[in-house]
Image (cartoon, rainbow, N blue to C red):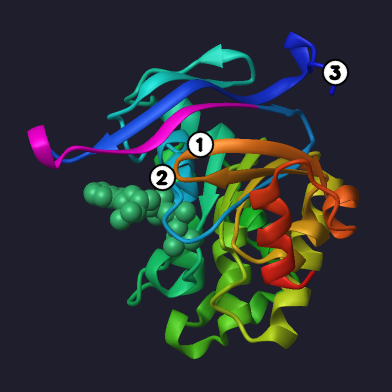
Amino acid sequence: MNPIPTTERAVETVNLAIAFGQSNQRRQVVSDVSLMLARGESYGLIGESGCGKSTILRALAGLNPDYHGHILFNNREQQPHRDKAFYRQVQMVFQDPYASLHPRKMVWASLREPLKLHDMDRHEARISEVLHAVGLSDAFRYRYPHQLSGGQRQRVAIARALILEPSVLLLDEPTSALDVSVQAEILNLLSRMRQQRNLTYLLVTHDLAVVTHLCERVGVMYQGKLLEEVSAARLRKGDAQETYTREFLAASEV
Ligand SMILES: Nc1ncnc2c1ncn2[C@@H]1O[C@H](COP(=O)(O)OP(=O)(O)OP(=O)(O)O)[C@@H](O)[C@H]1O
């Protein structure tokens, strides 16, 4: 694969390494992972449970400053403790929207919070625009999370991520807590948002159908290492270089 020109790089890790625990309890969870995503690309990280996918995403999102190696966004090296400007550019969407939305805040309040934090203008207009973009009417402003379906809650969580007009979304199993029928709707919404807003996605999932639906390129992880990178088209055909990947694909019955 051709390297991505420097000016076109949206997300990059260089020799990323992450360990947890102290002294003899210390365990290396991510080893020497180097990834490069082009602007506007959608890249999936797959691999069996515990292989370190979410750990990488959390480090990228600035949620775990204790890493070795380098993390770059838009070709700028990031410090382990990120500044406020970073969070306007990079937003994360979690698996469980219940956990990411405040239970006692109405939708409008959850959406206004990041706008206030980042001193953005036109709160009311931005809230209406983003609700409309994710397929929710203005009436949803006055609902609490428990008054929403799982799919509607995830739409609000996506709206909350988008309201700051980021360039990168980090998606951690964004559909796996949802009913199968709703999963496709949320995947279609994410695809549409990426196209309309020229977003870059880094998606973590164990679900091959999700990754082949949403991503162009896929990194296969095994025991904390990036084993290989495959195009989604090749992945669909079960065509991979590493035996582990082929076994993983066969076991997942794509
Ligand atoms: N804060 C932490 N402290 C200690 N160990 C951790 C911590 N976070 C993750 N781990 C361990 O790191 C390993 C990788 O976890 P991670 O969540 O990245 O895996 P994953 O590939 O995303 O798996 P899954 O698909 O099950 O979410 C696991 O063994 C996990 O127990």
Position of 213 compared to 87: left or right?
right
Q: Which residues are magenta?
A: 23-35
| Nearer to the camera, 116 or 187 | 187
Tell which circle, 3 or 2, labels the residue nearer the N-terminal end.
3
Q: Residues within 10 Å of mark 1 (few under 14, many from 20)?
A: many
Label for residue 2? Answer: 3
Please name the residue shown 58% across and 71% down the image: 154
The single residue placed furthest to the front in the displayed view is 243
Whether residue 133 is visible here, answered yes or no, is no
Q: Secondary structure at mark 1?
A: strand
Name the residue that disc number 2 marks. Answer: 55
x, y percent for residue 230: 78, 41
Q: Secondary structure at mark 2?
A: helix
Q: Amino acid at mark 1?
A: Lys
Q: Are marks 1 and 2 in contact (CB under 8 Å)?
A: no
x, y percent for residue 218: 73, 45
Q: Determine the CA span between mark 3 and mark 1.
A: 21 Å
Q: Quadrant of the N terminus?
A: top right
Q: Determine the CA span between mark 3 and mark 2.
A: 27 Å
- For residue 252, what is the image quadrant? bottom right
Name the residue that disc number 1 marks. Answer: 225
Q: Determine the CA span between mark 1 and mark 2.
A: 12 Å
